[in-house]
Image: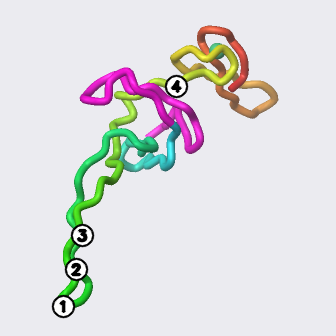
Amino acid sequence: MNMKVKKGDKVIITAGKDRGKSGKIMQAIPSDGAVVVQSLNMRKVHIRPKKQGEKGQIISKESPLDVSNVMLICPQCSKPTRVGYQVSKGSKSRVCKKCKETI
Ligand SMILES: [Zn+2]
């Protein structure tokens, strides 16, 4: 799947319980069309005790979000935007559809 966002991008969430919040992409998962955004879409995860006598733990962990539920925040104009592509000299670069800057 063609991913318009990548690791390190700042995105805003457009659907779900964290709608309107923004964060940085920690991990992009092109095979699932999903991204993991730092501190967002948290889910409780049970950790089993490793040894006898140890207690299990419940921790909060980011779970992947569908890439269609996030929108890139342009680093140039700081607005949520759609991503376009520009091809020049055989290489493809991403452009912001709002300010037309390369991002
Ligand atoms: Zn822009």
Give the position of the C terminus as an image quadrant.
Answer: top right
What's the mark number on residue 47?
A: 3
Give the mark nearest the N terminus, 1 or 3.
Answer: 3
Residue 6: give x, y in percent of width and height: 55, 40
Amino acid type, mark 4? Leu
Q: Is residue 6 magenta?
A: yes
Magenta-colored segment: predominant secondary structure: loop
What's the mark number on residue 49?
A: 2
Amino acid type, mark 3? Ile
Give the position of the N terminus as an image quadrant.
Answer: top left
Front position in the image: 74 or 61: 61
Is 6 placed left or right of 87 in the picture? left
Q: CA distance from mark 1 to mark 2?
A: 7 Å
The answer to whether mark 1 and mark 2 are in CB contact below 8 A is yes
What's the mark number on residue 72?
A: 4
Q: Quadrant of ligand 1?
A: top right
- Residue drawn at x 59%, y 12% is 97
Residue 83: give x, y in percent of width and height: 56, 21
Tag 1 residue: 52
Q: Quadrant of residue 75?
A: top right
The range drawn in magenta is: 1-23
Q: CA distance from mark 2 to mark 3?
A: 6 Å
